[in-house]
């Protein structure tokens, strides 16, 4: 890379001066008196200075070349912290570290002052963030478009073993990297009614009696690695249109002003903390239309600055819809093309369906967005009219293809049963529909979206997810990153397939030692974090067995903790049983209203209380629940993991991306053949993973046949019966033996996630882990092979596929003339 050249650009003395000046102008203080937060701000503003020139140069270049741009529309961008990542991608990290050292500050400590930008729930939001990083690094013109939530994902505390939620006031000290762009504000209208006006023989549809808000964009820089490219994440804030007029004596006007203030405030107030679950709240639909209308309006205005003919839109713009949440984009684009640009339906529809594309992230029925028509049409009257017409024409097409087949209409219509089905609207309005892992796409084509696939197979494609190695290796695991660079050079930073060059070292004992020693150092770092944040002592020589992800029944944290209970039983009752010391590490936020998920958190903490305090097991098992799992502590956790728990019920996890982050950092997968695990095993070899459980086909077969009977297992499997009984006999809830009865009932009545069914197979795989870890060389080799074979899972690879196969983008080079 051009790292050396870039580093030569860095003016260390100038930077130090700027930090000192920034502290003075921002906080009226000499640097010696500044708080760590103030130093963080001062450093960030100094870094921003370096970013701005590249940012301007990038956009100048895009305009000069009039390039095609992708707009990645997403309700969520789970960015995490910016400072460290920005320095990494500017290739200034080491130089700034040195500069700060000389000023008497530790960069790591300064980084820790930054709150995570947690504008997302989990996988879907983090994927969007990784994609932005890759787009900029590859030099593709792109905008991320989202919402500037005042409060992001809640902060999780653990009180008495239970999750408590606290507001995430991430903007309270300001965000040094953002730039407010008031000049690009647009109006977004809600409610009212549609009036038809005839002008020159053509009907025009005009929304009247509406309430509206001013959408104001804030831009965040997204820096490409060492290439001068800076793309933009544009997040929208809402402001009242009418200034709040205190001296107005007109009561009606005054009340209207207050109403509009409130409307603006509430729209962007908070991120809905549900993942893979649809709640159907009116405010959520308002959020969706708010950021989509603003983003699409702005994109069209920008397009028109450089292009005369609106028919050329698909040649210059793609809207990629991250799940169904941004799907109103289809109708909003139709509205703008017809009502504002004056196009006829067919023309507008042709343009729209060559501009929009849709990514599906789930097959879980409870996650499918369906809006009651009553609500949808009241809130978005003109958009609803358009959706009605889309539906009318789409149903005609279905009937033409399948005359007399009412089932097809029932399964595919956009409007059905009084509801607007957002996935159907997304498919009808898109030229591309993609799943996020090979197995997931196959299930979409063969089952979930079968009718749509049969109608238009060429529309469907797979894009297996990926992660950015810049954040999840280069920044998160500097020891391993340096070791890899020493061995094979630094090209892996922008081309992860180079990691396969590490394969020649996997049998080399010295390399094995070095690799495992780095893992050990990272485990010490995590142990320190756990001591500081949880006050639990863990032994870095034990196996770090990690499950970190959102809490959801289908992800089966319950299977993991039931197995811990089982191991504990064995240690207590089988004198001949022994095991290698293991630390079971959990981290997970439960959606605030998801009772059962919260009860599972309480169970994990209750098991931890008993097991961690039982001296008789000699520390063989430790259980730790890491509070407030988020991007910033994830970086520490992945680097330190020995075992990656990816144990979802097969067919339920569309892809998973945590699995890839563990693999990259040298942790073998203990998992089911689900999502991208299938492809991980393909890359690394099944002998370098611990695979167990029903296959997706087997799960789906049981489901077609009405499930299975968990009581058969309860009756025949002593180990299972024992842990289930312990859920209701007070072993883990002496003060309230009924506390976990709901979990007991869910497992013995239906067990919809096949936890008991997969229990034995999971326990067996866990035994294999225990044995394998004790073969030091064998384990080192397996761990190294996981890193060496992770090349496919770079989001750079994923984005190249999107760019070539869906978006048809061209790369742009940016140079800085000084
Ligand atoms: O998207 C996740 C899937 O569960 C993962 O398997 C996949 O790897 C990841 C990226 O493709 N889905 C997800 O995170 N969904 C949500 O967070 C979500 C949020 C709100 C909502 C529905 C889903 N209404």
Image (cartoon, helix red, strand yellow):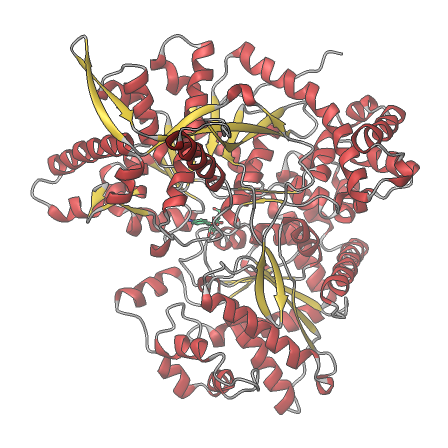
Q: Nearer the viewer, residue 75 or 406?
A: 75
**Residue located 75% across and 45% down the image:** 113
Q: Position of residue 116 (x, y in %)?
A: 65, 45
Among all residues in the image, which is located at the extreme left? 404
Question: Percent x, y for residue 709?
Answer: 33, 78
Specify the quadrant of the image occupied by residue 712.
bottom left
In the rendered view of the protein, which quadrant contains the N terminus? top right
Q: Nearer the viewer, residue 497 or 19?
A: 19
- Location of residue 585 with respect to 569 vertically, above or below: above
Instruction: Pick the residue in front: 256 or 164.
Output: 256
The residue positioned 23% from the left and 41% from the top of the image is 414
Q: Is residue 570 found left or right of 708 in the rendered image?
A: right
- Looking at the image, residue 190 lies above or below residue 323: above
What is the quadrant of the C terminus in the image?
top right
Residue 252 image point, x, y percent: 37, 32
**Residue 592 makes an appearance in the image:** yes
Visible residue check, residue 420: no
Q: Is residue 605 above or below residue 54?
A: below
Quadrant of residue 766 in the image? Answer: bottom right
């Amino acid at each position: 890379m051009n790292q050396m050249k870039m580093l030569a650009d860095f003016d260390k003395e100038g930077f130090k001066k700027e930090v000192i000046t920034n502290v003075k102008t921002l906080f009226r203080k000499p640097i010696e008196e500044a708080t760590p937060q103030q130093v963080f701000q001062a450093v960030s503003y100094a870094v921003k200075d370096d970013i701005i020139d590249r940012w301007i140069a990038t956009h100048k270049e895009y305009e000069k070349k009039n390039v095609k741009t992708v707009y990645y529309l997403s309700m969520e961008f789970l960015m995490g912290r910016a400072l460290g990542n920005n320095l990494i991608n500017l290739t200034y990290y080491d130089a700034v570290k040195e500069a700060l050292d000389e000023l008497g500050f530790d960069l790591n400590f300064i980084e820790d002052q930054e709150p995570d930008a947690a504008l997302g729930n989990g996988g879907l939001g983090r994927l969007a963030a990784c994609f932005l990083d890759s787009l900029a690094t590859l030099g593709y013109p792109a905008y991320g478009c989202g919402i500037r939530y005042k409060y992001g994902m809640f902060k999780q505390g653990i009180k008495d073993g239970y999750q408590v939620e606290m507001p995430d006031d991430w903007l309270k000290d300001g965000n040094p990297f953002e730039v407010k762009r008031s000049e690009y504000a647009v109006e977004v209208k809600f409610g009212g009614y549609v009036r038809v006006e005839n002008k020159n023989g053509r009907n025009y549809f005009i929304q009247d009696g509406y309430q509206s808000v001013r959408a104001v964009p804030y831009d965040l820089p997204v820096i490409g690695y060492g290439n001068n490219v800076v793309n933009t994440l544009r997040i929208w804030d809402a402001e009242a249109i009418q200034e709040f007029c205190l001296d107005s004596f007109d009561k009606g006007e005054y009340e209207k002003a207050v109403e509009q203030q409130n409307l603006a405030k509430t729209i962007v107030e908070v991120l809905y903390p549900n993942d893979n679950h649809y709640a159907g709240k009116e405010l959520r639909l308002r959020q969706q239309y708010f950021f989509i209308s603003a983003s699409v309006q702005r994109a069209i205005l920008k397009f028109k600055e450089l292009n005369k003919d609106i028919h050329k839109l698909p040649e210059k713009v793609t809207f990629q819809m991250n799940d169904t949440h941004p799907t109103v984009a289809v109708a909003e684009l139709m509205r703008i093309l017809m009502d504002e640009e004056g196009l006829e339906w067919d023309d507008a529809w042709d343009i729209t369906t060559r501009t929009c594309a849709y990514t599906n992230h789930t097959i879980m029925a409870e996650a499918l967005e369906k809006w009651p028509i009553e609500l949808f049409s009241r809130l978005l009257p003109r958009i609803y009219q358009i959706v009605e017409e889309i539906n009318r024409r789409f149903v005609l097409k279905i009937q033409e293809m399948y005359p007399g087949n009412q089932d097809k209409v029932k399964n595919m219509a956009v409007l059905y049963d009084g509801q607007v089905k957002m996935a159907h609207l997304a498919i009808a309005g898109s030229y591309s529909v993609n799943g996020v892992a090979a197995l997931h796409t196959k299930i979409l084509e063969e089952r979930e979206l079968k009718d749509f696939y049969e109608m238009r197979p060429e529309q469907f494609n797979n894009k297996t997810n990926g992660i950015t190695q810049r954040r999840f290796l280069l920044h998160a695991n500097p020891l391993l990153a340096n070791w890899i660079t020493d061995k094979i050079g630094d090209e892996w930073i922008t081309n992860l397939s180079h990691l396969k060059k590490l394969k020649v070292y996997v049998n080399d004992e010295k390399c094995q030692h070095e690799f495992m020693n780095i893992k050990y150092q990272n485990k010490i770092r995590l142990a320190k974090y756990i001591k500081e944040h949880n006050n639990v002592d863990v032994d870095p020589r034990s196996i770090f067995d990690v499950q970190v992800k959102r809490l959801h029944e289908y992800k089966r944290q319950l299977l993991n903790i039931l197995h811990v209970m089982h191991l504990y039983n064995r240690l207590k009752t089988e004198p001949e049983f022994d095991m290698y010391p293991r630390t079971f590490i959990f981290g997970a936020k439960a959606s605030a209203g998801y009772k059962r998920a919260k009860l599972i958190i309480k169970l994990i903490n209750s098991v931890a209380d008993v097991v961690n305090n039982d001296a008789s097991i000699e520390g063989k098992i430790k259980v730790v629940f890491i509070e407030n799992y988020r991007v910033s502590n994830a970086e520490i956790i992945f680097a330190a993991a020995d075992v990656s728990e990816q144990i979802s019920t097969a067919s339920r996890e569309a892809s998973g991306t945590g699995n890839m982050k563990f693999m990259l950092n040298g942790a073998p997968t203990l998992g089911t053949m689900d999502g991208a695990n299938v492809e991980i095993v393909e890359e690394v070899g099944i002998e370098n993973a611990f695979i167990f459980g029903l296959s997706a086909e087997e799960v789906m077969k049981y489901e077609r046949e009405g499930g299975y009977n968990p009581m058969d297992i309860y009756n025949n499997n002593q180990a299972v019966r024992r842990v289930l009984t312990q859920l209701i006999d007070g072993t883990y809830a002496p003060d309230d033996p009924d506390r976990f009865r709901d979990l007991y009932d869910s497992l013995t009545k239906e067990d919809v996630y096949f936890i008991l069914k997969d229990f034995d197979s999971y326990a067996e795989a866990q035994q294999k882990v225990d044995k394998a870890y004790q073969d030091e060389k064998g384990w080192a080799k397996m761990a190294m092979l996981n890193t060496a074979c992770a090349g496919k899972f770079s989001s750079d690879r994923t984005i190249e596929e999107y760019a070539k196969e869906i978006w048809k983008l061209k790369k742009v080079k940016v140079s800085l003339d000084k």
